[in-house]
Image: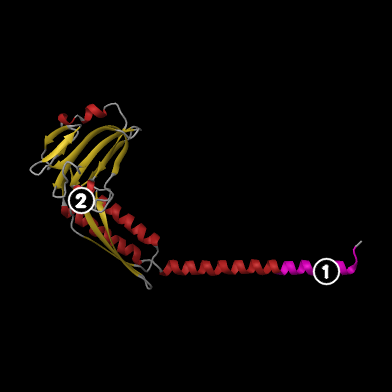
Amino acid sequence: MMDKSNDSGQMLLLAAFTIGFMVVVSTVMLNNIIYASNMAYESNNDISYFEVSNIARMTDEATKAAYYNATTGTSFNHTVFSRYLENYSRETTLLYAYSGVSFSFTNSTLYDAYFTKNGLSSGQENWTIIDNVKATDNFTMELTDTSNLGDISEPFEVHALNQSGSSIWFMKIYDDGSNIKANVSNQTYNIDPSFIDIKGNVTYKFDNSTAGKTYSLKYLNSSNIIGLYSLSGELSTGESFRCERYKMINATVDIATSKNKINVTFPVTVP
């Protein structure tokens, strides 16, 4: 049986614990309220990284859509392309105006792209274009500028790699000082760089090397080359694929709120 002094001590200890617990809970709740309020305020007044990223993604998709709408067969209608992007700029400006954000979009003229992953001279130059290819129906390249092309010791290379990563077919393009040459599976040819039909030219033996195999297609030293490429075919899953690059364009976006203003220019590959 406990005496009254022990009961009183336990009651005081319990009361102290309860008060302390309430203080902690109240502090956490107050901090959460302040944090939530600040986040809400900032979201209404600041331009977040997510917002800029979202605009970049929308602009990239709009530019590609503009290209597809402006392309009929093999011809490209620059007027249709420009009007599509003008409509995109107008509609997006109205959309952001409702949320109190000023938005404007301008685009540069189209220019030739490098064969790097992002189309820029500083982009990743050794990269895989497509994986898990079952069959290639079309593979063409047009080299619009070969002034940066290396010699035989540093050529631009195209490889078909099997699932183990070994090259089952390759093409090395280089400048020997007087002609542009292509070395294909150890056979050398003079080529016309304005149009290279890898799939259609039987002397390149692309079909012989890749038929019945699953492979990936990869570029090496692609910062040596400026131009356009197009390839299409079927994946090992049975799905069709198409990879192409026509040009590059610089998209400039201005975004402004009452607190911040951002001006950003980013390159977009077309398509």
Compared across the picture, whether 201 is left or right of 62 comes to left
Label 2, on which residue?
A: 113
Q: What stretch is highlighted in magenta?
A: 2-19
Of the residues shown, which amino acid type is indicated by label 1? Gly
- N-terminal of the pair, mark 1 or mark 2, is 1
- The figure's colour scheme reads secondary structure
Q: Which of 189 and 14 is in front in this view?
A: 189
Q: Where is residue 212 in the image (x, y as percent from the top left)?
A: 29, 26
- Spatial CA distance of label 1 from label 2 is 81 Å
Residue 1 painted magenta: no
Predominant secondary structure in magenta? helix
Q: Is 227 drawn above or below residue 257 in the view shown?
A: above
Q: Residues within 10 Å of mark 1 (few under 14, many from 20)?
A: few
Q: In this image, 170 relative to 28: left or right?
A: left
Secondary structure under the numbered disc 2 in the rendered image: strand
Residue 154 to residue 61: above or below: above
Q: Can residue 233 be seen in this view?
A: no
Question: How many numbered marks have been drawn onto this rendered protein structure?
Answer: 2
Determine whether, in the image, residue 134 is placed left or right of residue 205: right
- The amino acid type found where label 2 is placed reads Ala
**SS state under label 1:** helix
Q: Which residue is drawn at 18% across and 53% down?
A: 80
Image coordinates for residue 184, horizontal then vertical, percent? 18, 33
The dot on residue 9 is 1
Labels 1 & 2 near each other (Cβ < 8 A): no
Say if the magenta span includes residue 10. yes
| Residue 87 seen in the figure | yes
In the image, what residue occupies the spot 19% across and 38% down?
172
